[in-house]
Image (cartoon, helix red, strand yellow):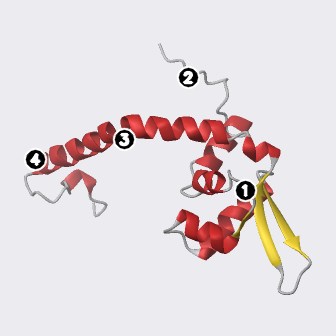
Amino acid sequence: MSRFDPGGGFLADCPARLTVELLADKWSAVVLYGLSEGPVRHGELVELIGDVSRKMLTQTLRRLEAHGLVHRHVYAEAPPRVEYELTPLGSTLLEPIHVLTQWAKTNGEAVLDALDAGTESDDDSNGNGNGNSDSDSDSD
């Protein structure tokens, strides 16, 4: 028996689904965690996170700000200085992000092993060794 209740918390317009979709974004959880120690400037956040473009970081910060998780503070200086920090609401996500991080540390190898096993199984089943079977093709 499944514990997933169709009338439960993941309907199209429910807050739980919105939150999962927000955090499922590639950079959202990383950005939130990057802001966990206090206000950070955009360039510092790029360096802290690594491997994120400035454009993608800006888009992610804007989305998190629109959802009330991040506050953008512009200082009236020349040149202007901008810092980002978690709102009290955004801070409430640090514990769930920490739990997911711990899960990944504990189970990451098993997930990678499963991916590798699936890839090897695909290679063996179609006999061509490239991982593409006729059923995977869109050229019907």
Q: Nearer the viewer, residue 76 or 12?
A: 76
Q: Residues within 10 Å of mark 2 (few under 14, many from 20)?
A: few
The circle on residue 108 is: 3
**Residue extending furthest toward the bottom:** 78
Q: Amino acid at mark 2?
A: Phe
- Where residue 96 appears, x then y in whole percent? 61, 36
Q: Earlier in the sequence, mark 4 or mark 1?
A: 1
Instruction: Please tell me whether mark 3 sits on a helix, a strand or a loop.
Output: helix
Q: Earlier in the sequence, mark 2 or mark 4?
A: 2
Asked whether residue 14 is in view, the answer is no
Q: Residues within 10 Å of mark 1 (few under 14, many from 20)?
A: many
Query: What distance separates the C-alpha of mark 3 from that of mark 2?
Result: 24 Å
Proximity of marks 4 and 1: CB atoms separated by less than 8 Å? no
Q: Image quarter for residue 45?
A: bottom right
Q: Can you tell which of label 3 and label 2 is closer to the viewer?
A: 3
Q: What residue is shown with label 4?
A: 124
